[in-house]
C-alpha cells in the first residue's frame, strides 16, 4: 500500500490517497492557468499534423471504401479489402517487401556496427573512412539508383567489366529474376551504411571506458567484452536504428522504380510500388487507398512491437 | 511640404503598380505541357514560345517539359487534375491519350477542327488518331514510327551486305546470330539484335504480333485476345532468338541501357527521334547507321506511335488553347520541325521530309503507312500490367508462351470485366 497514490475527481474535489495513511482533501480553489501564448506557439505543429497527416489518413480511409478513379466515386464497401486477398501481384509485393526489409535491416544494422567498431580502432584514418562510408548517404536515392543502374549494366557496366576482366561470366544483374532483389538491397545498404555507422560510432563513444577496464580486470577477452559490454550498451542505438530502418525499408519505392520498376516478373515489386501503380497507372485510387491503410496498420503494429520489446534496457543508470 | 510630396509619390507609385498589374493581367496565360522528347526540346529551345507570343501578343505562353517516361507524364497529369491544375494544352503520346482521353479528360475539338482552314491539308490518319469514339479529343501532330536500324560497319565486318537489310523473320533471326560477337567465356560483346528483357509491349511485341496476323486486342468490342495462336507463335519466335543470347539485357524505355544506342548493338528497333539523338551524340557514326523498311511475315507492320495535342476539360480558355494548337500546326512551324527529323502531318509538306532525308525518308513514310499505335482501349495500362510479367517470364524461361499468355489473359479479364 505504501507509496501508492491514487487520484480521482469527485464533485470538484481532488482526492489523494497517500498509501492508505489518510485522505488529503484539496479544494480546487482556482481554475488551471491556460497559457494562450504557449498554445499559439505549438499551434503550427498541430495545424500541420491535422492538415497533412491526420486529415489525409481520414480521407484515405474513406477513399478505401470507394472505387474512386479521378472521375467517378461509388461506395463499394469492403470490396477493395477483399480484393487484396485474391490479388497475386499484391501478395508477391508483400513477400518481397518483408524479404527486402529483413535483409536490408540486418545488413545495414549489422555492417554499420562492424564498420563503426573497425573505424574507432583505426585511429588516424577514422575521419577519412567515416567520410567515405558516409558520403553515399548525402546523395539522393534517385541519383544513387542511376549510378547503380550504370554499375549493373550488363553490356558495359562496371561490375561486368570487372568480372570479364578476370575471365568470369557476365551476369544480367537487375534483369535476372534471381539477382534483381539482391541488387536493390545492395543499393540501399550502400546508401544507408554510412548513416548507421555514424549513429553507432556516436553510441560507441558514449560507452564509459571504465566498463571495459572492469571487464578486463575480470579477465574478459575482446569477444566477451563485445557481447557483455558493447552490445548491451548499444541497445538504445540499435533500437533507434531498427525502428527508423524498419519504417524506411517498408516504404521502399524510389530504388525499385528506377532500377527495376518491379520486374522482372514482379520479383522486386513492393507494397509501395503497388500502391503507386494501382493509383497512378491504373487509376484505381480506392484500391490503392485500401492497400495504404493496411500498410499503415502493419507498420504501426510492427513499430509498436518494436517499442514494446525492443526498448528494454534503455534505462541503464551509470551514474 | 515634404510629407505631402512623399505621400503624392507613394500614391503615384501605387497607381502605377496597379496600372502595370492591370496591363499584365490583360494577357491570357496558356499553360502547355509536353513529354520529354529528343526533338521537341530543341524545337522549344529554338524560340517557339517567342514566335507564338509575337504572333499572339494577347497570350502569355508557359511551357513545361515533364521529365521521365510517358507513364510519368500521366502520373503528373493525374496529380495536376487532383489539384485542379491541369495544363490548358498537352503534347502527349498515344498511350497517354488512350487512357486519359477515354476517361474524358479532354474537350471535344470537333467544332474547332470542322471550322479549321487547314483541315483539308492535314493527313486523315493524323486527324483520326485524335478520335475517341466519334468525337475528336485531340489532334495527331507527329507520327513516331519505329524502324529497324542497323550499323553498316558491323554488317560489313560480319560479311553481310549493308544494302540488303533483313526483310522477314527468317532473315532477321539469321542476321542476329551472324552479327553477335561473344568472347571466350561466351559473354556477348556485340549484340546482334536488341530484344528487350523487360517488357516494352509497344515497340517489339505488338508489331511482331501484327506482322504475324494477330489481332491482339479487339478494339471495337474492347476484348483482349492474348491467347490467339498468332500471339503465341510470335512469342515463341522472339524467345527462340533471345535464348540464343544474340542480345544484351536491356529496358527499351531506358535509352542508356539499349545496346544499339550504346554502340554495342548491330540492329535495333528505334524511332527517328532516337536516330537524331544517336547521331547528335556520336557524330563519328555519320554514314554508319541506316534504317530498313518494315519487316514482314504475313504482312509488313511496325509500331507507329503518335504525338497528340489536346485541350484539358478543365481549361477555362479553350479558344486560346486552340489558337496555340493552330499555331503549332501551322506550315511554318511544322517545316521547322522537319529539320529536327519530325515527320510532318500536312499533305503539302509530305514530300519535303523525303527530300530532306533521302536515305531513309521513304522508309519512314512507309512505316507510318503500315504502322499501328497503342490500342485505344480504356484498360491499355492494365493490359501492359499483365502482359509485362508474362513476357518476362517467357524470356526468363520460366513459362512457355502458351502458359504465360493464358495466365495474362485470365488476369486481365478478371480485372477489366
Image (spheres, coloured by chain):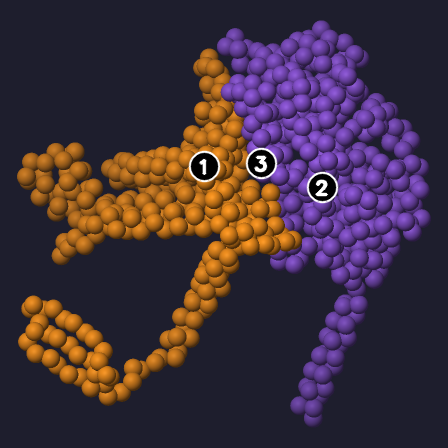
Chain colours: A orange, B purple
Residue placed under numbered mark 2 in the picture: B98
Disc 2 crowd, CA 10 A, few/some/many (<14, 14-19, 20+): many
Residue placed under numbered mark 1 in the picture: A91
Q: CA distance from mark 1 to mark 3?
A: 16 Å
Q: Quadrant of residue A225?
A: top left
Q: Is residue B78 above or below residue A261?
A: below
Q: Is the N terminus of chain B in the top left, top right, bottom left or bottom right quadrant? A: bottom right
Q: Extreme top residue here?
A: B159
Q: Nearer the viewer, mark 3 or mark 2?
A: 3
Q: Nearer the viewer, residue B135 or A276?
A: B135
Decide if residue B338 is on the left or right side of residue A314: right
Q: CA distance from mark 3 to mark 2?
A: 21 Å
Disc 3 and disc 2 in contact, CB within 8 angstroms: no
Q: Nearer the viewer, residue A183 or B54?
A: A183
Q: Is residue A255 above or below residue A294?
A: above
Q: Pinpoint residue B46: horizontal percent, then vertical percent.
A: 78, 45
Which one is earlier in the sequence, the residue at label 3 or at label 2? 2
Q: Are marks 3 and 2 on the same chain?
A: yes
Q: Pinpoint residue B205: horizontal percent, then vertical percent.
A: 67, 25
Q: Are marks 1 and 3 on the same chain?
A: no
Protein chain holding label 3: B
Indicate the secondary structure of the residue bearing disc 3. helix
Residue placed under numbered mark 3 in the picture: B414
Amino acid at each position: 500500500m505504501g507509496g501508492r497514490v491514487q487520484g480521482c475527481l469527485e464533485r470538484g474535489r481532488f482526492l489523494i490517497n497517500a498509501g492508505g495513511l489518510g485522505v488529503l482533501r484539496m479544494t480546487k480553489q482556482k481554475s488551471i492557468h491556460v497559457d494562450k501564448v504557449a498554445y499559439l506557439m505549438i499551434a503550427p505543429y498541430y495545424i500541420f499534423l491535422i492538415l497533412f497527416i491526420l486529415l489525409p489518413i481520414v480521407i484515405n480511409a474513406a477513399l478505401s471504401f470507394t472505387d474512386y478513379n479521378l472521375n467517378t466515386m461509388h461506395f463499394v464497401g469492403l470490396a477493395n479489402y477483399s480484393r487484396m486477398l485474391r490479388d497475386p501481384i499484391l501478395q508477391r509485393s508483400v513477400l518481397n517487401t518483408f524479404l527486402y526489409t529483413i535483409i536490408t535491416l540486418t545488413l545495414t544494422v549489422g555492417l554499420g556496427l562492424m564498420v563503426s567498431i573497425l573505424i574507432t580502432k583505426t585511429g588516424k584514418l577514422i575521419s577519412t573512412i567515416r567520410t567515405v562510408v558516409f558520403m553515399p548517404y548525402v546523395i539522393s536515392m534517385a541519383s544513387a539508383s542511376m549510378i547503380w543502374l550504370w554499375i549493373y549494366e550488363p553490356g558495359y557496366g562496371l561490375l561486368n567489366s570487372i568480372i570479364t576482366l578476370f575471365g568470369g561470366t557476365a551476369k544480367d544483374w537487375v534483369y535476372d529474376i534471381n539477382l534483381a532483389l539482391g541488387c536493390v538491397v545492395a543499393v540501399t545498404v550502400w546508401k544507408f551504411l554510412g548513416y548507421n555507422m555514424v549513429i553507432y560510432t556516436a553510441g560507441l563513444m558514449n560507452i564509459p571506458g571504465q566498463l571495459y577496464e572492469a571487464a578486463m580486470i575480470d579477465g574478459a577477452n575482446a569477444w566477451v567484452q563485445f557481447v557483455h559490454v558493447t552490445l548491451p550498451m548499444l541497445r538504445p542505438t540499435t533500437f533507434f536504428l531498427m525502428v527508423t530502418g524498419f519504417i524506411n525499408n517498408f516504404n521502399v519505392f524510389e530504388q525499385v522504380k528506377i532500377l527495376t520498376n518491379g520486374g522482372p516478373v514482379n520479383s522486386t515489386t513492393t507494397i509501395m510500388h503497388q500502391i503507386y501503380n494501382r493509383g497512378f497507372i491504373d487509376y484505381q485510387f480506392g484500391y490503392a487507398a485500401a492497400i495504404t491503410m493496411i500498410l499503415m496498420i502493419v507498420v504501426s503494429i510492427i513499430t509498436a512491437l518494436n517499442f514494446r520489446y525492443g526498448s528494454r534496457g534503455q534505462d541503464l543508470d551509470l551514474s | 511640404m515634404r510629407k505631402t510630396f512623399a505621400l503624392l509619390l507613394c500614391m503615384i507609385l501605387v497607381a502605377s503598380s496597379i496600372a502595370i498589374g492591370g496591363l499584365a493581367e490583360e494577357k491570357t496565360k496558356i499553360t502547355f505541357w509536353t513529354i520529354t522528347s529528343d526533338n521537341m526540346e530543341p524545337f522549344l529551345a529554338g524560340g517557339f514560345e517567342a514566335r507564338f507570343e509575337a504572333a499572339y501578343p494577347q497570350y502569355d505562353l508557359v511551357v513545361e517539359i515533364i521529365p521521365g517516361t510517358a507513364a510519368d507524364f500521366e502520373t503528373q497529369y493525374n496529380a495536376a487534375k487532383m489539384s485542379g491544375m491541369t495544363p490548358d494544352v498537352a503534347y502527349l503520346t498515344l498511350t497517354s491519350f488512350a487512357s486519359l482521353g477515354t476517361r474524358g479528360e479532354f474537350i471535344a475539338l470537333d467544332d474547332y477542327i470542322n471550322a479549321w482552314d487547314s483541315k483539308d491539308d492535314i493527313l486523315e490518319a493524323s486527324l483520326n488518331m485524335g478520335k475517341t469514339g466519334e468525337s475528336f479529343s485531340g489532334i495527331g501532330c507527329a507520327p513516331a514510327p519505329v524502324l529497324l536500324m542497323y550499323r553498316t560497319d558491323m554488317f560489313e565486318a560480319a560479311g553481310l551486305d549493308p544494302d540488303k537489310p533483313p526483310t522477314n523473320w527468317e532473315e532477321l533471326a539469321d542476321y542476329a546470330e551472324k552479327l553477335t560477337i561473344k568472347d571466350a567465356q561466351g559473354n556477348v560483346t556485340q549484340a546482334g539484335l536488341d530484344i528487350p528483357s523487360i517488357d516494352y509491349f509497344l515497340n517489339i511485341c505488338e508489331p511482331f504480333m501484327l506482322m504475324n496476323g494477330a489481332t491482339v486486342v479487339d478494339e471495337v468490342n474492347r476484348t483482349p485476345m492474348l491467347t490467339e495462336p498468332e500471339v503465341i507463335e510470335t512469342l515463341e519466335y522472339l524467345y527462340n532468338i533471345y535464348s540464343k543470347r544474340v542480345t544484351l539485357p536491356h529496358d527499351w524505355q531506358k535509352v542508356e541501357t539499349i545496346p544499339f544506342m550504346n554502340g554495342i548493338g548491330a540492329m535495333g528497333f528505334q524511332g527517328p527521334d532516337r536516330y537524331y539523338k544517336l547521331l547528335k551524340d556520336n557524330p563519328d557514326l555519320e554514314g554508319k547507321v541506316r534504317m530498313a523498311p518494315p519487316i514482314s511475315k504475313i504482312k509488313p507492320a511496325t509500331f507507329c506511335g503518335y504525338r497528340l495535342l489536346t485541350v484539358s476539360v478543365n481549361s477555362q480558355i479553350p479558344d486560346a488553347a486552340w489558337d496555340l494548337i493552330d499555331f503549332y500546326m501551322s506550315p511554318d512551324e511544322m517545316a521547322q520541325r522537319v529539320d529536327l527529323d519530325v515527320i510532318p502531318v500536312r499533305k503539302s509538306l509530305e514530300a519535303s521530309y523525303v527530300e530532306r532525308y533521302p536515305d531513309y525518308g521513304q522508309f519512314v513514310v512507309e512505316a507510318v503507312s503500315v504502322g499501328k499505335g497503342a490500342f485505344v482501349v480504356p484498360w491499355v495500362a492494365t493490359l501492359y500490367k499483365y502482359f509485362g510479367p508474362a513476357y518476362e517470364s517467357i524470356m526468363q524461361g520460366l513459362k512457355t508462351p502458351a502458359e504465360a499468355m493464358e495466365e495474362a489473359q485470365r488476369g486481365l479479364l478478371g480485372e477489366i470485366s
